[in-house]
Image (cartoon, coloured by chain):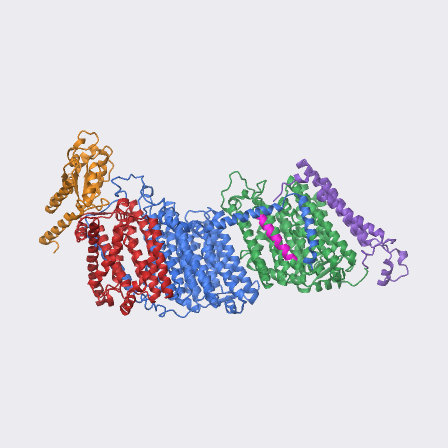
């Protein structure tokens, strides 16, 4: 019965609903964008009403929030954290810097496009993005989840070699456990 | 035999006083003097005093020698009474015997003591007893 | 009759004088003769002891002069027991020191002469029934003891010997004074006679004489504060002589003192006095032993303490108490001799004889260390070894007399004893051995002697009945003053030879 | 038969000692044969009620077995045999093995002797034999002998001498050494003796049972002896103290007119022992020390049970005694296994052995659960009975104290498991292998027995009940559980089993759910793969948290733990030694001074002659 | 057999009930907290969503078999206490295993799970987990004292260790124990603060400090089971308090009302509180709550 296609569909609906409304974020406060997280979570904008809630460790988290520019040094940690998260998992690039380097476009030690290193599901534009746009980003992610299109993790698994290649280019001393999903 | 100690003539009294004095002198030398030789001398004096005391116990004024010479026991059966009667005038021989023994012993002790003093002097180069105390506690 | 008690004095004396003469003939005879003598005497004493326990005291009159005039030797169960013990210890010490001064012939001659004299003197103290004779024997013992203490001719042994001599001279002075007092009062020197007539003495003089005796004999019995000489002498004398001191000489001293206090005079308060003085001796000695750095000195203090214990047991005064005291004496003689004998091998290699120098020596001297451990465990009274039974009889005796505080005191002192013995044991067995220490292995005969003592400890420990019968007889004979007087004075009513 | 038993053990001990010189195999064979032979004879040939007597040193010695002593010899021989097997493997390659096995057998012999003695003198002899044979074990390692060894022997001797005093008093009063006669004549002693004899005896027993003011030897002694013996030491030897205490409490204290005070004091001492033992166990970094303090604490519970002395309390004490032997035996063996495989027993050094030594872990886990008294295992039954008895006998504050102790016990229980087996799996310990089967099997056997006891406590409760009947208690079957409902009849028949089954069922159900769900997508990751802020711990980086493990808790209880009993004793000892050192200065070394002493002595006696000889 | 089926059935129904109510309470907690913080807050059913999401996580990791078993351990505690604690008066609900409910047994079974989970947390090798565990255990040693004091006071006063008996007494006398033994109730109530581990006693799993402490390596299905166990356990504890002090409940609605009103106490206390350090919280429990406990015992002994 459980393998029945229709019931599987129902299960999927419930699952996606649950995943959509329960986004536990791991806010990786890499850059200045982290300053926008508190207003988003506190009473003015209250992201918790959308089911968004902070998670303490990557093991429990669903969403990895890269807040702002990402130095090459931090990238390693971010990759590590991402790989420690459990499926299904999503990445939100937060602020312009994660898109194209932003004001650090010519810095020698920040990465310019996050997408080359981690599979980003949603970008939130702005420098910095206001809480409204953060909420909009979450809404977009929820939409994607509902539609089953937030499959960054799958992409990452499929194109792991490419990602690794990019990552190793930036990170000279690569000393990480195998990622075997 | 009677109790003699408090039945004293002047001479006997003098003996006792003298012997006690000698003992005290010996003790003084042995206990207070710091030189080993003097201590040994003190011990000898002590010995002498005691010997004198012992002798004086058996002393009898105008007593005869405690010898039952053939002349003395002639014609007398050897009964207890007779012997008592005979020995009344005699000086008690036992203390003398004791003293003889004690003198011999004292001599031996003094000899040993002196030899020890010699050896102590060889090792310590002093005769002061206060400085010879390697063994303590 | 196998032999008479006179032989106990005559034979060793004779042998002592024969030794140098025989030495000219055959050098080895110097070593063998004392052993033969002691072995014969051991046999004699054992047979006599057996006889005495069953048939009663043997009183030997010397030269036909009947008591109270002549000198007599009393072989009662008590004196017989002590004689046997002393001869036994002497024999074992002879076995131990058979190869002593192996090279130096002259020294060996001296040593064996003095050893025989020491044993003779001590046996004489015990056997004699005449008080002045006892004094003479005490002096014989003392002089040979002085000489033996100074035997090594070292700086310290001379010092120890001189101290011993000084105090010993005082002792003989007091003894002579006491004898003089008694003689002036009673006109007799025979112990039994004195005991029978003691009530005739004026009380002041009796007490004065008693005090002089206590002081004089207390020095030999090592009671505090008269025992200043003891630790030095024990520590500086050669190892077997230390054993002889604790196994033979002290026993004689205690015997003399107890004989004077129990038999000669019946003054009230002696028992309490003994208890008090014994406890003080015990406590001070054990306290002094705890922080001791020298092994043999520690053993010496322990020995003094044990003698204090013996005196306390005598002070209890009941038959049980005396039994306990005799048992303690017996065990102490055996165990402390073992400790001295094995202990002197443990520190053989060192000049300072420090306790810290026995570290880890058990690996090189397994048997000696084991015997030392056995002795230590036995002497603190751990069952099932010999020391336990004597301590136990002492405790029951005290409990019977309602002296519970004494039990507490004795046991707490035992705790102190335990501490310092086990500290040494731990060092022997569990401390790392110093590299530079070159250990001297014990000779076969030394091992034999120590093994014999260890065996005795085990035998008495597992089967105390082997000795308790004799001890009971001995304690009865000590307490039965009337019988002693009767036995002695009824021997030979003949006035003249 | 008793003779044969004893001579087998004694002869075996000596033979083993001698065989050591010849060959190791012979020695091991002798040792094992002796132990097995003794056990075999004990279980097959010895019947309860048998008596032998003989006379030595004019004392009549009497040995025999009754149900009470049978119960304790069960502990001794059961644990002893398992520990013997364990020892063979644990001691392999160490020095002085003949000595070790000799002491081992002698201590087993003396423990059997203690429980079989029917007279005081052989009781004392065996008691002392036990003391020195275990002392040999304490100093076997050669570490801290001057401290721990002396501590142990000193306290033991203190206790033994107290006992000796008591025995002497008894002997002086009734002229008999029989324990039975002592008990029957107890009522005729003077009131002072009636109080003092039990106190003196209890002093002796509480030393061995490591009760509070007299416990200071225990941590050092337990941790310094080889673990193969410590399991016996803590498991069986300390029970001899309990054995004696039960005897005294049942036979003597209950006849005292004011026994309530006595019982209260001892129950409280037991409770304080439990609390302080627990707190100190929490603070330890050395596993052996931790277990040693834990033993002290566990014995505290037992002492409380004994002191309360109602039927249920006594039953719980007996049950806990056997149980403590089981789990503490297992735990010390586990420590031994870890020590042997890794070479250290410090929690701050060893971590993450669970995958390397799984069987050891399982055994320790079960033992720890039993120790903590957590339900499905036997430990709970004992604890529960203790609580019930305390509540029934109106000792409410005691319940709190005991409960506090056993709650805090979770802290060190966890520390033990975590410290050794959990945490980061370090490369340093990657080479570690499981201990040899000879070591693991005894542990697992005992742990398995603990599990069985959780469901069927009657296995032990029945002999305990018989033992108590020997002591004059009414049969406890059926009437004890008036207040509670957990075991409304005999413990193993009613509701315990459903509970245990329910626990097992729930556990298995959820375990299966956890395992089956997403089986394919569940993977094992190494302990280096942890979420540590994205950092990748390097091989040499040790992230295990094991230093200052319970610092906050210890800070909270700091004021209580500021004072250590042992420092008091040590200061007392140092003070005494100073006095001794001062005293021996009487012997100045100057001959003249000695002569003056003689004269002073003379003068004093002359002056006091009327007082002394008046 | 019939009995076993009944127990199993009862267990399942009780579990579902407890799960539902417990999760709802958690959700309400979040809602109320949000409202007090002037937020809208998540919907009351938010925790259901969270639990379902955790359950539908596709992957999960573990560091070893102990961690794998940890959630099962804690589930044992939750379910067992649920089975032992009678849910309604006179066992009108499923009697399960509660045969009269022994308090001592309950006390011990309540620590079974946390310890098991602590072992799991230990095996992760994450220092945060171990630190959290030590804090949790220390805190437990703290709050167990007033809690046991309160229970002992009840046991003394009514001469029973059975929960059912205590409930029957309340039904018979018509007087709640929180009034007849007020000190015991106070002590137990304060101990409850520690039991629920809300602020100020939430240092065990403080997300900011310890990254949620013992749970920091658990995700997916493990966290799912833990969360369910937690909510079931919360309900069981609340029911126990209601049974012991508030006269039990005659039907489920009353039970829910009573438990929720009781639940408000730790919740509201927590919202307005900062966080205690471990030793502070331990000392707190050994302070006033224990004093109340002592008073309760004295009260029970002498009145």
Give the residues in magenta: C273-289
User: x, y (%) of residue A51?
Assistant: 17, 48
Q: Is residue E298 left or right of residue D586?
A: left
Q: What is the drawing colour of chain D?
A: blue
In the displayed image of the protein, which residue is found farthest to the left? A6
Chain assigned green: C
Foreground residue among C52 and C431: C431
Residue C351 inside the magenta-drawn segment: no
Of D549 and B115, which appears nearest the observer? D549
The colour applied to the residues of chain E in this rendering is red
Q: Quadrant of residue C321?
A: bottom right
Q: Is residue C276 magenta?
A: yes
Which color was chain A given? orange
Residue D509: which quarter of the image?
Answer: bottom left
Q: Which chain is purple?
A: B
Q: Is residue D283 visible?
A: yes
Classified by dominant secondary structure, the portion drawn in magenta counts as: helix
The spot of residue D91 in percent (x, y) is 41, 49
Q: Residue at x 42, y 61 (%)?
A: D304
Q: Nearer the viewer, residue C207 or E90?
A: E90
Residue D290 located left or right of residue A75:
right
Query: In x, y percent, where is residue C133?
Result: 74, 54
Can you tell which quarter of the image residue C325 is in? Answer: bottom right
Instruction: State how many labels appear.
Output: 0
D607, above or below C23, in the image: below
Quadrant in which the C terminus of chain D is drawn = bottom right
Residue C443 x %, y % = 58, 45
Note whether C327 is above or below D288 in the view shown. below
Residue D59 in view (yes/no): no
Q: Nearer the viewer, residue D233 or D2?
A: D233
């Amino acid at each position: 019965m459980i393998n029945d296609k229709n019931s599987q569909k129902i299960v999927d609906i419930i699952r996606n609903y649950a995943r959509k409304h329960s986004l536990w974020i791991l806010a990786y406060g890499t850059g200045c964008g982290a300053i926008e997280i508190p207003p988003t979570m506190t009473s003015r904008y209250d992201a918790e009403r959308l089911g968004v809630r902070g998670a303490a460790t990557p093991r429990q988290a669903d969403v990895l929030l890269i807040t702002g520019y990402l130095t090459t040094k931090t990238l390693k940690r971010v990759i590590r954290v991402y790989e420690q998260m459990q499926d299904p998992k999503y990445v939100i690039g937060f602020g312009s810097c994660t898109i194209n380097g932003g004001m650090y476009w010519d810095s020698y030690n920040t990465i310019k496009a996050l997408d080359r290193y981690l599979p980003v599901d949603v970008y939130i534009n702005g420098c910095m993005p206001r809480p409204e746009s953060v909420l909009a980003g979450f809404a977009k992610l929820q939409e994607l989840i509902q539609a089953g299109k937030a499959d960054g993790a799958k992409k990452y698994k499929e194109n792991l070699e490419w990602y690794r290649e990019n990552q190793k280019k930036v990170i000279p001393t690569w000393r990480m456990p195998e990622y075997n999903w | 035999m009677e109790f003699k100690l408090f039945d004293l003539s002047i001479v006997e009294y003098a003996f006792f006083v003298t012997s006690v004095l000698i003992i005290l002198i010996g003790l003084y030398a042995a206990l207070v003097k710091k030189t080993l030789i003097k201590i040994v001398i003190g011990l000898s004096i002590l010995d002498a005093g005691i010997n004198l005391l012992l002798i004086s116990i058996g002393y009898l004024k105008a007593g005869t020698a405690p010898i039952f010479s053939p002349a003395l026991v002639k014609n007398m059966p050897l009964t207890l009474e007779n012997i008592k009667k005979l020995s009344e005038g005699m000086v008690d021989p036992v203390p003398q015997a004791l003293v003889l023994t004690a003198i011999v012993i004292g001599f031996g002790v003094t000899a040993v003591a002196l030899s020890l003093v010699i050896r102590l002097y060889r090792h310590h180069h002093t005769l002061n007893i206060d400085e010879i105390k390697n063994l303590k506690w | 009759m196998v032999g008479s008690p006179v032989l106990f004095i005559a034979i060793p004396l004779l042998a002592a004088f024969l030794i140098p003469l025989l030495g000219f003939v055959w050098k080895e005879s110097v070593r063998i003769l004392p052993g033969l003598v002691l072995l014969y005497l051991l046999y004699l004493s054992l047979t006599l002891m057996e006889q005495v326990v069953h048939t009663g005291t043997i009183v030997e009159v010397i030269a036909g002069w009947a008591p109270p005039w002549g000198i007599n030797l009393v072989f009662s169960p008590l004196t017989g027991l002590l004689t046997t013990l002393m001869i036994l210890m002497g024999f074992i010490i002879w076995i131990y020191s058979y190869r002593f001064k192996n090279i130096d012939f002259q020294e060996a001659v001296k040593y064996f002469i003095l050893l025989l004299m020491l044993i003779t003197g001590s046996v004489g103290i015990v056997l004699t029934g005449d008080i002045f004779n006892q004094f003479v024997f005490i002096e014989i013992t003392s002089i040979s003891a002085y000489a033996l203490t100074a035997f090594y001719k070292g700086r310290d042994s001379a010092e120890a010997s001189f101290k011993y001599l000084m105090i010993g001279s005082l002792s003989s002075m007091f003894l002579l004074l006491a004898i003089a007092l008694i003689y002036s009062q009673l006109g007799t020197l025979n112990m039994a006679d004195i005991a029978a007539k003691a009530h005739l003495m004026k009380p002041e003089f009796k007490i004065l004489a008693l005090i002089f005796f206590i002081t004089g004999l207390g020095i030999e019995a090592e009671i505090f504060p008269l025992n200043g000489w003891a630790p030095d002498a024990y520590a500086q004398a050669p190892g077997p002589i230390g054993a002889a001191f604790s196994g033979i000489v002290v026993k004689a001293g205690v015997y003399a003192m107890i004989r004077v206090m129990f038999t000669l005079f019946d003054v009230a308060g002696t028992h309490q006095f003994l208890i008090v003085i014994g406890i003080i001796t015990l406590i001070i000695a054990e306290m002094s032993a705890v922080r001791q750095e020298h092994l043999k000195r520690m053993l010496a203090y322990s020995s003094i303490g044990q003698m204090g214990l013996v005196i306390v047991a005598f002070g209890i005064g009941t038959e049980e108490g005396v039994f306990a005291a005799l048992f303690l004496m017996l065990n102490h003689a055996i165990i402390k001799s073992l400790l001295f004998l094995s202990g002197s091998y443990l520190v053989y290699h060192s000049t300072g004889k420090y306790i810290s120098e026995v570290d880890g020596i058990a690996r090189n001297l397994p048997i000696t260390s084991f015997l030392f451990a056995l002795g230590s465990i036995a002497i603190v009274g751990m069952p099932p070894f010999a020391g336990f039974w004597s301590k136990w009889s002492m405790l029951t005796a005290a409990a019977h007399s309602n002296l519970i505080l004494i039990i507490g005191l004795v046991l707490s002192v035992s705790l102190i004893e335990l501490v310092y013995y086990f500290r040494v044991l731990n060092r022997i067995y569990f401390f790392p051995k110093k590299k530079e220490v070159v250990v001297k292995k014990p000779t076969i005969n030394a091992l034999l002697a120590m093994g014999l003592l260890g065996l005795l400890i085990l035998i008495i420990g597992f089967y105390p009945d082997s000795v308790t019968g004799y001890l009971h007889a001995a304690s009865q004979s000590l307490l039965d003053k009337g019988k002693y007087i009767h036995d002695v004075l009824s021997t030979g009513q003949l006035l003249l030879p | 038969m008793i003779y044969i038993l004893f001579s087998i053990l004694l002869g075996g001990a000596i033979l083993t000692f001698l065989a050591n010189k010849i060959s190791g195999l012979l020695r091991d064979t002798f040792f094992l044969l002796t132990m097995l032979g003794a056990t075999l004879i004990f279980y097959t040939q010895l019947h309860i009620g048998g008596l032998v007597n003989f006379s030595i040193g004019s004392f009549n010695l009497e040995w025999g077995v009754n149900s009470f002593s049978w119960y304790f010899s069960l502990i001794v021989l059961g644990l002893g045999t398992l520990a013997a097997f364990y020892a063979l493997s644990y001691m392999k390659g160490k020095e002085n093995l003949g000595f070790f096995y000799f002491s081992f057998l002698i201590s087993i012999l003396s423990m059997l002797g203690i429980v079989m003695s029917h007279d005081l003198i052989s009781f004392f002899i065996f008691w002392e034999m036990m003391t020195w044979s275990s002392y040999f074990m304490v100093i076997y390692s050669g570490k801290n002998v001057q401290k721990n060894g002396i501590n142990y022997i000193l306290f033991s001797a203190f206790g033994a001498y107290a006992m000796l005093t008591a025995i002497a008093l008894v002997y002086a009063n009734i002229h008999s050494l029989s324990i039975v006669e002592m008990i029957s004549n107890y009522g005729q002693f003077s009131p002072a003796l009636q109080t003092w004899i039990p106190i003196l005896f209890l002093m002796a027993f509480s030393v061995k049972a490591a009760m509070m003011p007299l416990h200071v030897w225990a941590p050092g002694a337990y941790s310094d002896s080889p673990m193969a013996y410590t399991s016996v030491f803590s498991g069986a030897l300390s029970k001899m103290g309990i054995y004696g205490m039960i005897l005294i409490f049942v036979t003597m204290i209950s006849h005292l007119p004011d026994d309530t005070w006595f019982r209260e004091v001892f129950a409280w001492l037991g409770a304080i022992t439990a609390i302080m033992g627990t707190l100190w166990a929490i603070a330890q970094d050395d596993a052996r020390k931790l277990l040693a303090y834990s033993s002290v604490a566990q014995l505290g519970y037992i002492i409380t049970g004994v002191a309360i002395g109602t039927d249920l309390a006594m039953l719980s004490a007996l049950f806990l005694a056997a149980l403590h032997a089981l789990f503490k035996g297992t735990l010390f063996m586990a420590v031994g296994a870890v020590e042997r495989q890794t070479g250290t027993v410090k929690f701050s050094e060893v971590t993450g052995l669970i995958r390397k030594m799984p069987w050891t872990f399982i055994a320790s886990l079960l033992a720890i659960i039993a120790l903590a008294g957590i339900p499905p295992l036997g430990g709970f039954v004992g604890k529960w009975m203790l609580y019930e008895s305390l509540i029934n006998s109106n000792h409410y504050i005691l319940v709190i104290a005991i409960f506090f102790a056993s709650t805090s016990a979770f802290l060190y229980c966890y520390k033990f498991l975590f410290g050794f087996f959990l945490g980061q799996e370090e490369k340093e310990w990657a080479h570690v292998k499981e201990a040899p089967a000879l070591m693991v099997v005894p542990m697992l056997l005992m742990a398995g027995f603990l599990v069985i006891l959780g469901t069927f406590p009657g296995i032990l409760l029945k002999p305990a009940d018989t033992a108590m009947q020997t002591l004059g208690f009414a049969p406890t079957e059926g009437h004890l559980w008036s207040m509670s409902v957990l075991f409304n009849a005999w413990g193993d028949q009613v509701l315990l089993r459903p509970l245990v089954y329910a626990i097992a069922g729930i556990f298995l159900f959820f375990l299966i759910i956890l395992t089956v769900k997403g089986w394919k997508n569940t993977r094992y990751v190494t302990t280096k793969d942890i979420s540590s802020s994205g950092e990748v711990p390097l091989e040499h980086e040790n992230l295990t948290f094991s230093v200052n493990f319970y610092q906050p808790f210890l800070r909270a209880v700091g004021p209580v733990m500021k004072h250590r009993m042992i420092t008091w004793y040590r200061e007392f000892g140092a003070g005494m030694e100073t006095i001794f050192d001062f005293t021996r200065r009487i012997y100045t070394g100057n001959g003249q001074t000695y002569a003056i002493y003689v004269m002073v002595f003379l003068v004093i006696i002359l002056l006091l002659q009327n007082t002394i000889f008046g | 057999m019939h009995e076993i089926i009944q127990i199993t059935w009862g267990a399942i129904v009780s579990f579902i009930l407890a799960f539902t109510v417990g999760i709802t309470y958690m959700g309400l907690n979040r809602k109320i907290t949000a409202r007090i913080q002037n937020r809208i807050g998540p919907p009351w059913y938010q925790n259901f969503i969270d639990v379902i999401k955790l359950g539908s996580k596709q992957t999960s990791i573990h560091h070893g078999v102990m961690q794998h078993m940890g959630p099962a351990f804690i589930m044992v505690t939750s379910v067992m206490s649920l089975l032992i604690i009678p849910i309604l008066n006179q066992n009108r609900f499923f009697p399960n295993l509660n045969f009269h409910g022994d308090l001592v047994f309950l006390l011990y079974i309540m620590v079974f799970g946390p310890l098991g989970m602590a072992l799991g947390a230990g095996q992760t090798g994450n220092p945060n987990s171990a630190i959290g565990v030590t804090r949790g255990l220390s805190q437990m040693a703290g709050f167990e004292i007033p809690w046991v004091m309160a229970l002992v006071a009840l046991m003394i006063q009514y001469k029973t260790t059975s929960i059912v008996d205590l409930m029957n007494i309340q039904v018979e006398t018509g007087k709640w124990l929180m009034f007849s033994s007020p000190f015991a109730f106070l002590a137990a109530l304060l101990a409850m603060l520690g039991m629920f581990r809300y602020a100020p006693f939430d240092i065990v799993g403080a997300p900011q400090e310890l990254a949620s402490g013992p749970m920091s390596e658990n995700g997916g299905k493990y966290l799912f089971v833990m969360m369910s166990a937690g909510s079931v356990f919360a309900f069981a504890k609340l029911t126990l308090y209601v049974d012991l002090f508030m006269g039990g409940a005659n039907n489920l609605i009353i039970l829910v009302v009573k438990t929720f009103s009781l639940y408000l106490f730790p919740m509201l206390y927590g919202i307005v509180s900062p966080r205690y350090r471990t030793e502070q919280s331990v000392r707190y429990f050994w302070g006033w709550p224990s004093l109340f406990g002592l008073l309760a015992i004295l009260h029970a002994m002498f009145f």
